[in-house]
Amino acid sequence: MFKALHAKRGSQLIIGFLVGVIFGFLLQKGGATRYDVIIGQLLLTDFTVLKVMLSAVVTGMIGVYALKGAGMAQLHPKSGSFGSSVIGGLIFGVGFGILGYCPGTVVGAVAQGSLDALFGGVVGILIGAGLFAVAYPKLEKGFMKIGDFGETTVPQALHVSPQLVIAPLCTVIIGLLYWLESIGL
C-alpha cells in the first residue's frame, strides 16, 4: 500500500495537506496557537506547548518505529551537524522570542484570524527564509559542517536497538508529563 503511494506525488501532497490541517486544528484546540499561552511557555508559567510537543514526540516515536517494525515504512534521516543545529536553533529562537509563535503555531494562529501572526509571522518567515537562502552557500561550506554527524538516528549513533532508546525515553517523557500535570503546570 505505501509503495504504491510512494509513486504518487499528488496523493502524497494531498495527504500531507490534510494531516497539516488536522495538526493545525489540534494545535488550535489545545491552545498552542494563542499568543498568551506561547509567551507563558517562554516565561515558564504555562507548559501547554511543552505538553503538546512532548505528547507528539512520544506518539511519533512509537508510531514511526511501529510502522518501521511492521515493514510499512523506512527511515530516511537527513544529514545533520551541530553547526546547522546551532544556526537553526538561533533563527527559530529569535523568531519565537520576538513574535511569540513558532512556524507551526503561526499558521494555526493565522487560520484563527490573528493578524499579528499573519503580518509578523508570515512576513518574518519569508524574510528569514530569504536571508538564510542568501547566506546558505557560505554557511554550507563552513559553519554548517562543524560537528557533522551524517545521516544517522540516535539508536544508530549509540549502536543499540531502537527499543533501548524509545522505551526509556517515552517513560521519562510520560513521567515528566504526569509530574507537570500533578503540580498544576
Image (cartoon, rainbow, N blue to C red):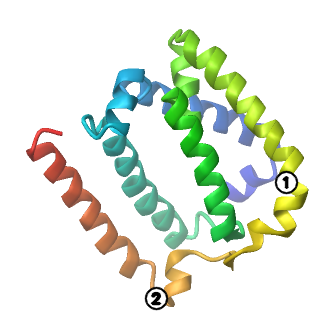
The crowd level at tag 2 (other Cα within 10 Å; few <14, some 14-19, many 20+) is few
Q: Quadrant of residue 75?
A: bottom right
Q: CA distance from mark 1 to mark 2?
A: 34 Å
Looking at the rendered structure, the secondary structure element under dot 1 is helix
> Camera-side residue: 1 or 153?
153
The crowd level at tag 1 (other Cα within 10 Å; few <14, some 14-19, many 20+) is few
Residue 70 horizontal side relative to residue 88, left or right: left
Numbered tag placed on residue 160 in the rendering: 2
Query: Do we see residue 76 in this rendering?
Result: no
Looking at the rendered structure, the secondary structure element under dot 2 is loop
Residue 76 horizontal side relative to residue 167, left or right: right
Query: Do we see residue 117 in this rendering?
Result: yes
Q: Say what amino acid the circle numbered 1 marks.
A: Tyr
**Which quadrant holds the N terminus?**
bottom right
At x 90%, y 57%, the residue is 137
Residue 51 horizontal side relative to residue 114, left or right: left
Farthest bottom residue in view: 159
**Which quadrant holds the C terminus?**
top left
Q: How far across and how far down the image is residue 144, in percent?
A: 75, 66
Q: Say what amino acid the circle numbered 2 marks.
A: Val
Give the residue pinned by disc 1: 136
Q: How far across and how far down the image is residue 98, in percent?
A: 54, 31
Q: Quadrant of residue 32?
A: top left
Sequence-earlier tag: 1 or 2: 1
Farthest left residue in view: 182
Above or below, 56 against 99 in this view is below
At x 72%, y 70%, the residue is 79
Q: Quadrant of residue 11?
A: top right
Above or below, 171 against 181 in this view is below
Q: How far across and how far down the image is residue 29, in percent?
A: 37, 23
